[in-house]
Amino acid sequence: MYVGRDMTELSMIPKSEWKDSELAFFHHSFQQITPYLNAEGQTIHREIIEEIEARGGLKRNEADYTHGTQISFD
């Protein structure tokens, strides 16, 4: 379950200030509803993808006994 800022709050700040977990959660959410997004939703999703790409992706470089290699948004 996602615990963090909602889209209303996040829409008022630039994507560059979003946490990785927020980008991961909303990217996953938008990915699930892609066929139903209007033009504004598609633009927001594209901006999220561009920010993820600008950061070099969301994968962790190393795993350890407490963290896997995927960013968890739970």
Image: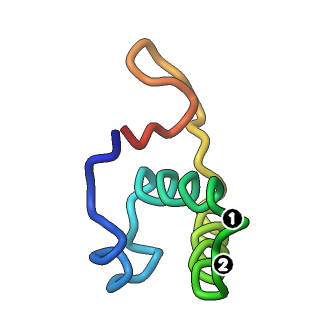
User: Which residue is at the front of the view, 4 or 31?
Assistant: 31
Q: Amino acid at mark 1?
A: Thr
Q: Residue at x 41, y 57 (%)?
A: 22
Q: How is the image coloured?
A: rainbow
Picture quadrant where residue 72 is located: top left
On the image, numbered disc 1 is attached to which residue? 34
**Residue 64 in the image, given as x and y percentages of width and height:** 47, 18
**Residue 71 versus residue 31 in the image, above or below:** above
Percent x, y of residue 54: 64, 68
55 sits left or right of 23 in the view: right
Helix or strand or loop: what does disc 2 sit on?
Answer: helix
The answer to which quarter of the image holds residue 13 is bottom left
| Quadrant of the snapshot with the C terminus | top left
Q: Earlier in the sequence, mark 2 or mark 1?
A: 1
Q: Tell me what residue is drawn at x 57 percent, y 58 percent.
A: 27
Which residue is found at the position 57% from the left and 79% from the top? 44
Tell me, for residue 42, which label it has, or none.
Answer: 2
- Coordinates of residue 65 in the picture (x, y in percent): 43, 12
Query: Residue 15, relative to residue 18: is it above or below?
Result: below
Residue at the far top: name it.
Answer: 65
Type of amino acid at the residue the image marks with label 2: Gln
Residue 49 placement (x, y as % from top left): 65, 67
Furthest-front residue in view? Answer: 36
In front of the other: 43 or 19? 43
What residue is shown at x 50% (from left), y 39% (from top)?
A: 71
Structural crowding at the residue carrying mark 2, measured as other residues with C-alpha within 10 Å and reported as few (<14), some (14–19) or many (≥20)? some
Q: Helix, strand or loop at disc 1?
A: helix
In the image, taking residue 51 as reference, residue 71 lies left or right, namely left
Q: State left or right for residue 28 relative to residue 2.
A: right
The reply to whether the C-beta atoms of the residues labelled 2 and 1 are less than 8 Å apart is yes
Disc 2 and disc 1: Cα gap in Å? 8 Å
As drawn, 1 above or below 49: above
